[in-house]
Amino acid sequence: MLCHEVGLIWYMFLVIKCDDFVTFFCVVRLRFCIPYFFLMRNIVYLLVFMLFMNSALTVSASDNTDLLLTEPTVEAPDFDARTFATCQEFESTMEKILPKQNNYYWRGGPVMLEQAPTDAVAAPAPIAAKSAQWAGTTTPHSETNVQVAGIDEADSVKTDGAYIYSYQAGENGIVILDAKNLNKVKTIKIPSNYSNPTFYVQKWKLILTTTKYVNSSRYWMGWYDNSQKTIIAIYDISTPANAKLIRLTQVDGSLSDSRLEDNWLMTAVVSTSYWTPPYYRVMMEDGKTPNYNYATRNLVPRISDIIYNGSKRIATNRAVADCKGMTALLPSEKTLGSYSFSPSLTSIIRLDTSVRDSRVGSSVVLSQAGQIHVSRDSIYLTSNLWTPYSTSTTAKCAPNTPCAASLIWNPGTSNTLVHRFAFDRQSTKYVYSALVPGNPLTQYSMDEDANKNFRIITSEWGDTQSTRLTVIGSTGTVVGKLAGIAPGENFQSSRFIWDRLYLVTFEQIDPLFVVSLSNPAKPTILGELKIPGYSTYLHPYDANRLIGVGYDTKTNQWWGTQNAGIKVDLYNVSDVKNPKQEATLTLGDVGSSSDVLWNPRAFVYYKEKKLLLMPATLMTSAGDPDNSYLAKSAFQWLVGLSLEPGRITEKFRISHIEKSESMNTDWKNACKNQGYGSWTPAYCKVWATLELYLANNLWNYSSQFVNRVLYVGESLYTIGESRIQMQNFASPTVPTAVQKFKVQSQNIGYPIAID
């Protein structure tokens, strides 16, 4: 009986989703769990239900009000601005907002806390005299590939033309090398509990940014996670051999991202997760009602700042925001009930790195930290915002009229909340919050134009996946949009260049869209190019061309589409209505990969030489029709590609992996205990080769991979975990200098030490 009833409900659902009666009949026949008698009875029920549905939908067609299935819309959250006169007022407000029960998501609205003017960044002071003596170099050299000109991004490798700076895990620090000969000049030690250290090099300063993990039994005290700390450490490298720490700033929470402007102003985004509260804290109350403490010290993260000036040490410790005089944007009751948020607090830190003792400015948002976009005078902070099913459905029935809409299950929609802050050297001011359907892919999904219009590309999921462009005006109003781009296809990459957007989506082929943004109120698709494969990163080549790096694709043995080799394209967009693939080159086969495909900072293009320098792991297919993933050989290289209009050619390959007798020994040892069971790896069979062994075990030699690359003039530097190697462009396969490193990490204690 239960099977019968469940089956009937399932058929009703199918009626809503399909139009073909034959489909229902075939599905009904598959119901082997009930007798044939019930099968026929259900068909009768089904016919009656279809007649009922047809009647309801006929009414709908006549007055156009029964079943309204429209483009999904998202109502913007509503906020009420308010300034707290006292800390007690702030605490009582937070007590109403923060939950008093254990759950994973905070059903509430985002609260923006804007720091009082007392936290303005100090006015610029003259840079120390020794910075004027910094020699620098005019020799062409690589710079970190950034999204916005003049806004630097932290990385694990840098060069100023005179020195190479590289974080080496095995050396537990940032190694400084002379670019002329790779002689080691200095190692700035990094503690082992510092995660993913990245840094900036700007004239005579090196600025380290990282997250420190604290192993403490008291990390859960208070309302926020105190086990992670963001570190901003500034070093004086005017004389690299005598590099020294001059400032150490620590902020509660993990580092999400940062930027450094060419005028020395730094922006860091720090995320602090709120407890909701922890389950084990509730259990510690032995079943009694917990007494939660909403004191400010438990709600607001803190900043610790140490300034070193010779033998003098100045230390301060304060909250990232003062509750008295704090401005808060509180959600309305409707907003509180319409959206779901993870309970986290995001601090926006502003620091003038040109002034040794400048005040650290901060603004705080009670919202998650997602992708960020920083321009000359604005920062856009995005966070994922989930709209539950109860508020996201767009289908409804006419009054007193039954229809299918009431049976449609809507799982909810994913949206993006955008906060804009405007800043200068004196202050950071909140401007607006806006809601956008869907979610961005990367930081390159966002851009600001000259008129402060914020352009954002998002992926939307509904009945089908599609891509959307939204243009938000300077005050937070949506001024233009382009929805439903490439239905059913995945958003793969985008690039905003002036008043144009170049967009790549993919299902089985790669459409490259050219979109005009000259009229922000009416974005327009100008042209489209469809070719096999897709690009995951787009880079300007010249005024009329784009470089695309991504994957070629192929049909596998199951008639599905899979990634093949790495594909480099040169697109000609001079005719915007008819963009063309001017040149293309595919490297390797199925299983090939490159960090450039997911990390744009690893993209190095030597414009003067028209050379693309790309680390890559390249697989050679075995050609097995039953296993398209089987490779007969593999190796890891730095590949040098010449990009000329109409032509892409491979110039050279450089590897750090040394094929030696030890590699043959590794191969033999790997096969010692094989062959006694029913399965023997192909690389252990009598006809196997060393190349086949590497195709299956290349990752064992990952410490010898070329991960990054830099150049200075005619010198090329390939960088890996175990070495940095120097070559000349005239003979790129012949090393001229090598600096080797330890591979195993060692524990280095806190605080930071420099030997």
Image (spheres, rainbow, N blue to C red):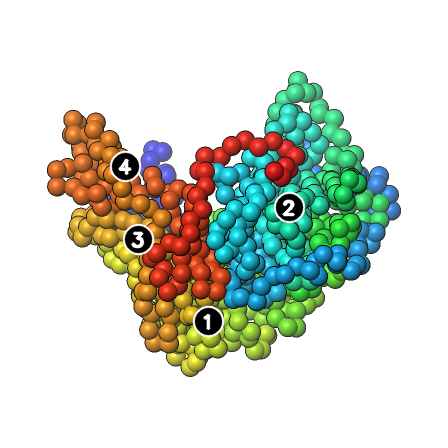
Q: Nearer the viewer, mark 3 or mark 4?
A: 4
Query: What residue would you read off at disc 4?
Result: 662
**Residue 150 position (above or below residue 18):** below
Query: What residue would you read off at disc 1?
Result: 608
Q: Residue at x 51, y 63 (%)?
A: 141
Residue type highlighted by circle 2: Asn
Query: Looking at this rendering, what residue extends furthest in the right direction?
Result: 85
**Residue 390 position (above or below residue 279):** below
- On the image, the x and y values in percent for residue 263 come to 69, 62
Give the CA separation, mark 1 to mark 3: 27 Å
Q: Which quarter of the figure is the N terminus placed in?
A: top left
Neighbours of disc 4 within 10 Å: few (<14), some (14-19), many (20+): few
Query: What residue would you read off at disc 2?
Result: 242
Counting residues from the start of the chain, the first of labels 1 and 4 encountered is 1
Q: Nearer the viewer, mark 4 or mark 2?
A: 2
Query: Looking at this rendering, what residue extends furthest in the left direction?
Result: 686
Label 3: which secondary element: strand
- Contact, mark 3 vs mark 4 (Cβ under 8 Å): no
Q: In terms of depth relative to the viewer, which is nearer, 729 or 33?
A: 729
Label 4: which secondary element: helix
Residue type highlighted by circle 3: Leu
Residue 259: name its quadrant. bottom right
**Residue 405 position (above or below residue 503):** above
Neighbours of disc 2 within 10 Å: few (<14), some (14-19), many (20+): few
Give the CA separation, mark 1 to mark 2: 34 Å
Q: In terms of depth relative to the viewer, which is nearer, 416 or 47?
A: 416
Q: Which quarter of the figure is the C terminus placed in?
A: top right
Residue type highlighted by circle 1: Glu
Q: In terms of depth relative to the viewer, which is nearer, 572 or 238?
A: 238
Q: Residue at x 63, y 37 (%)?
A: 753
Query: Which mark, residue 618?
Result: 3
Counting residues from the start of the chain, the first of labels 3 and 4 encountered is 3
